[in-house]
Image (tube, coloured by chain):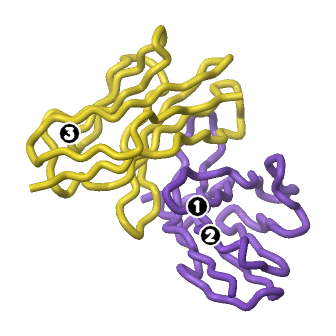
Chain colours: A yellow, B purple
Amino acid sequence: AQSVTQLDSQVPVFEEAPVELRCNYSSSVSVYLFWYVQYPNQGLQLLLKYLSGSTLVKSINGFEAEFNKSQTSFHLRKPSVHISDTAEYFCAVSDRGSTLGRLYFGRGTQLTVWP
Amino acid sequence: GAVVSQHPSRVICKSGTSVKIECRSLDFQATTMFWYRQFPKQSLMLMATSNEGSKATYEQGVEKDKFLINHASLTLSTLTVTSAHPEDSSFYICSASQGARGETQYFGPGTRLLVL
């Protein structure tokens, strides 16, 4: 079975500062990796995903994540955050071998950007 | 594209009554739909996976008779909370995918259920 650990439940940061949200996973099989974002009172939205190929994946709003197989990590980074990035961020994995595509989520990291 | 809707967005009901929540994929056919439950400040917990036209697969610890799931078409799945109790109060979220490996799941906005 897969498990996902997000070590930081809350990350406060000032606007325009860099941020890293950590995600580690445990799995006995190869996985796909995802980051979802949840804004207040909204559903989850896919931020970025790693399926194969380049281990560095990027989103359209400046976030990027790098798959590190040896460290079983998929940390999310942004060089300069905006107040609008304030949200809950969830890391998730799914089993490559599963046709069902079920996702296993971490507990989430609340990113709060202060002016 | 890839919009998933849920109805209702919030509902309050009395203990002992049943509540039905609808999940619809608006612009794509979802062969697989998932139902999650999210407690405050916690992650999403998968309750069940449903494929169109077949019985749902429930996660361990989820009562099949209490949480009835129907996936009648490629665009609609329903979750019925039967004989609701206050401890069933939660945020219920559905997602839909086309079922291929690695396929992105698209999430609905969620339904907040409060059982009095």
Q: Is residue B51 shown left or right of residue A2? A: right
Identify residue for label 1.
B39
Distance between mark 3 and mark 1 Cα atoms: 29 Å
Q: Is residue A82 shown left or right of residue B23? A: left
Residue B39 is drawn in which quadrant?
bottom right
Q: Amino acid at mark 3?
A: Gly
Number of labelled discs? 3
**Mark 2 touches mark 1? (CB < 8 Å):** yes
**Mark 3 touches mark 1? (CB < 8 Å):** no
Identify residue for label 2.
B90
Let me know if marks 3 and 1 both belong to one chain.
no
Q: Could you tell me residue B93's position as x and y percent?
A: 59, 63
Identify residue for label 3.
A62
Give the label on residue B70, or none: none
- The chain that hosts pointer 1 is B
Judged from the image, the secondary structure of the residue bearing numbered disc 3 is loop
Residue B85 is drawn in which quadrant?
bottom right
Q: Residue at x 20, y 57 (%)?
A: A84
Q: Residue at x 49, y 17 (%)?
A: A72
Q: Could you tell me residue B23's position as x and y percent?
A: 63, 69
